Amino acid sequence: MTTPSNENESKHANHGKGDAPVTRLCAHHLAGMSYRDADLVEDLIGKTTFTEVLFMQITGRKARPVDLRIVDAVLVTLMEHGLTPSAIATRLIYMSAPENLQGAVASGLLAVGSSFVGTMENCSRLLDRIQAADDPRAEAREIARAHRAQRHAMPGFGHHLHKPDDPRAIKLLALAEAEPELAGNSVKALRTLAAAVDEAAGRHITINATGAVAALLGELGIPTALMRGFAVISRAAGLVAHIAEEQESPSGRFIWDTIDNAIPYVGQGKSHQTSHQTSHQTQK
């Protein structure tokens, strides 16, 4: 005879194996909440850091000290890079809808993609290929050759502001290589790819911050498809800081006016720019 207790045990044992959806992330009850297998009130609040909990929630395992050191380094690195497209988007949306802080942050996060901030995902796919290859060096050379032949930017390499090397990448890779608990396979794959990229280009091209981040998160076992999430988490904090500054020293209108006057209207109709130019020429 099957008792209710046995039925519950059977259901829990088959979680994730049937068609019905399940969650292991969180549950609430009258006296509190559970984050995975931990009690929010008794086990986490006041006893763990934000990084520890986010790592546990995302990976399903307790963070080691080395995990925390690497993840914190990644989050600090990706938080800010000045008035980039994500920050500009956030500031302009906040200017337009100041009652909607979350909307402004969300607009900036939409810019975390395959061109800026989120390129560690693209780079990690290449590192996965190199690590899976029978001949990692040959695979790296083929990747570099194909990207150059197709005139595609190599994800994780190059930077228009940091030359000859991205100092963030140098620091991140040094941190990872100093950790004896890390296997070093992802970092080695990145170094192998870097050598192939330089060879194909005939000159040195720096590993950039997101390339280094791809290798570091790979060392922690973070799946490639989740890596961009760490950029989203980090950049969200940076975008809130941009809103805080926008509240004290607004720049949205200045950005709008600058673009409005810098990009010429070349149609046949009337334009405020034409009137401005005519007035300026008359004064001369």
Image (cartoon, helix red, strand yellow):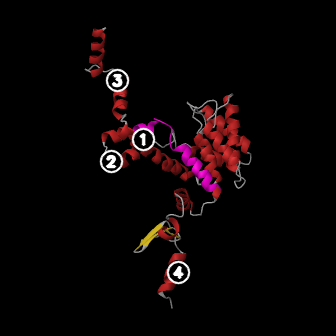
Q: Going by the picture, which residue comes out furthest to the bottom?
A: 1
Tell me if residue 229 can be seen. yes
Q: CA distance from mark 3 to mark 2?
A: 28 Å
What is the magenta range?
66-89
Mark 4 crowd level (few <14, some 14–19, many ≥20, 10 Å Cα) = few
Q: Earlier in the sequence, mark 3 or mark 1?
A: 1
Q: CA distance from mark 4 to mark 1?
A: 50 Å
- Residue that numbered label 1 is attached to: 242
Q: Position of residue 110 (x, y in %)?
A: 43, 44
Q: Earlier in the sequence, mark 4 or mark 1?
A: 4
Q: Which mark is residue 210?
A: none
Q: Is residue 29 left or right of residue 193?
A: left
Q: Is residue 221 left or right of residue 7?
A: right
Q: CA distance from mark 1 to mark 2?
A: 14 Å
- Residue that numbered label 4 is attached to: 9
* Amino acid on which disc 2 is placed: Asn
Which image quadrant is residue 210 in? Answer: top right
> Under tag 4, what secondary structure?
helix
Magenta stretch containing residue 194, yes or no?
no
Q: Earlier in the sequence, mark 1 or mark 2?
A: 2
Q: CA distance from mark 4 to mark 3?
A: 68 Å
- Residue that numbered label 2 is attached to: 100
- Residue that numbered label 3 is attached to: 261
* Amino acid on which disc 3 is placed: Asn
Q: Is residue 263 positioned above or below 75 on the image?
A: above
